[in-house]
Amino acid sequence: MNGFAALEAQIDDLDLLRITGQIRRVTGLVAEADGLPLPVGSSCRIICRTDGNRELEAEVLGFEEGRTLLVPCGSTAGISAGDRVLFEGDRFRVGVARSLLGRVLDGRGAPIDGRGAIAAEQRIPIDARPIPPLSRRRIAEPLSTGVRAIDALLTIGRGQRIGIFSGSGVGKSILLGMLARATDAPVVVIGLIGERGREVREFLERDLGDEGRRRAVLVVATADESPILRLRAARVATAIAEWFRDLGEDVVLLLDSITRVAMAQRELGLSASEPPTAKAFPPSVFTLLPRLLERTGPAERGSITGFYSVLVEADDLNDPIGDAVRGILDGHIWLSRSLANRGYYPAIDVLQSVSRVMQHIAGASHKAAAQALVEDLARYRDVEDLLRMGAYVRGAEPRTDAAIDRIGAIEKLLRQTPEERSTLAEAASQLIAIYEKPLAASVPPLPGGGGGAAVAARPAAGAASSAPSNTASKVAASRAGAPYFPQQRGRK
């Protein structure tokens, strides 16, 4: 930053305006003040005179009957009628610098890792406008996430926004840690919103690790903090990601979870007397979601690839927040509890997941093999119970027989330990290889018993159990650049 730019930044940070008001009433989370004509979103301070003149930061939430509604960034304990409210500046701004990499911040953007203050290169507002539609580059380049199931079957593009949908306890934090460590993006910004206090250090040391931490910025607002701080933490994390993107960097933003951001906004909305709608969420929640999520994506320089975890109630994919988020994002990944209960990690149910940009960024042979695998997995799921009971008879449907023969290779592709590394090219090659190898004549045993041996012992008379399916031909044709048209069967 040259001398004139530094001087301009200092002038921008000067507080040239001073407005004071007085607290009149506190109800729940909201404090009401007189004589404070401030715009919504302004940041001010409450001077608690009965608590040693302690200064409590607050944000303007709205207005009602000539009074300003404030939400303190902390407990309302200690606030009393007549306390002075002081406004000396603009909306809340966060300090940004390249030295943020490797640091842990709170919802105010202040460091909490005990490694000293951060020398800010610039102070930016946390509520930037989304990128105009015609200023967004098309998503044309894939991003390597390091997770085989995602790279092979749900290929993500640079600048894509995708949701990770799950109930509690199905490996969401482990998957986020794998993404943060193994992605090929140079900058990772992580927002942990509403998490338990003990989980922050566990994620930092166990899931993220030293390698992932070196190129990451972590913004934390735990469940015990005020809703305005939880909401602010999501905005701070997004603003930091935007700053790095504007420098031309490809950034990955991991926000865990957007559901808790919506819950924080619900608390604020209900405190401001908004009418409740679906599941008691007020209208402001459904206004906040697109405004926050549309801030990520590809710009003219750089990009933000957003991964937003969504906690769904009772594993219901049609939960109101989940349904609203799914309609905004460019795809979703569903973590299945039934797969997790079988020790299947990452517990990604590829049949319930989709990437809406994969068709535009993956190669022809890659897409053909991915479609073939999804078809095989669907066929296998249809007969899985019959396999466990030993009631399946081979030969009735050759394509299902082929899917059963491939299930061992498919599961090897989709299962991955947190320590295992993979690249997009390796995942695509392993996927395509499944449909280039000749099929084995025997069926691998199923996890949990049953299946393989019983099926192998009951072949149907005249059945060609090891005959390859048409999917291998489809992959070969796509790899050669030719379209694939399966031979039509005529009626007898």
Image (cartoon, helix red, strand yellow):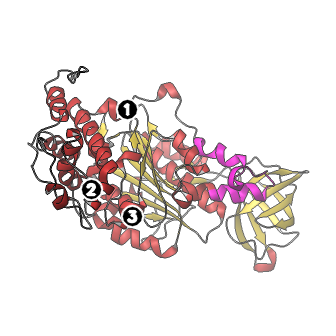
Ranked by sequence position, the earlier of labels 1 and 2 is 1
Q: For residue 51, say whether it is visible.
A: yes
Q: Which amino acid does label 1 sit on?
A: Ile
Instruction: Give the left or right position of residue 172, taking residue 279 as reference.
Output: left
Q: How far is disc 2 from disc 3 in space, using C-alphas?
A: 33 Å
Quarter holding the N terminus is top left
- Residue lying at 11% horizontally and 45% vertically, measured from the top left: 439
Label drawn at residue 269: none
Instruction: Give the left or right position of residue 373, taking residue 49 as reference.
Output: left
- For label 3, the crowd category at 10 Å Cα-Cα, with few meaning under 14, some 14 to 19 and many 20 or more, is many
Tell me where the magenta segment starts and ends, as one range: 263-291
Q: Where is residue 102 drawn, in percent x and y?
A: 37, 62
Nearest the viewer among 25 and 410 is 410
Q: What element carries label 3?
A: loop
- Residue lying at 66% horizontally and 43% vertically, measured from the top left: 287
Label drawn at residue 391: 2
Ranked by sequence position, the earlier of labels 2 and 3 is 3
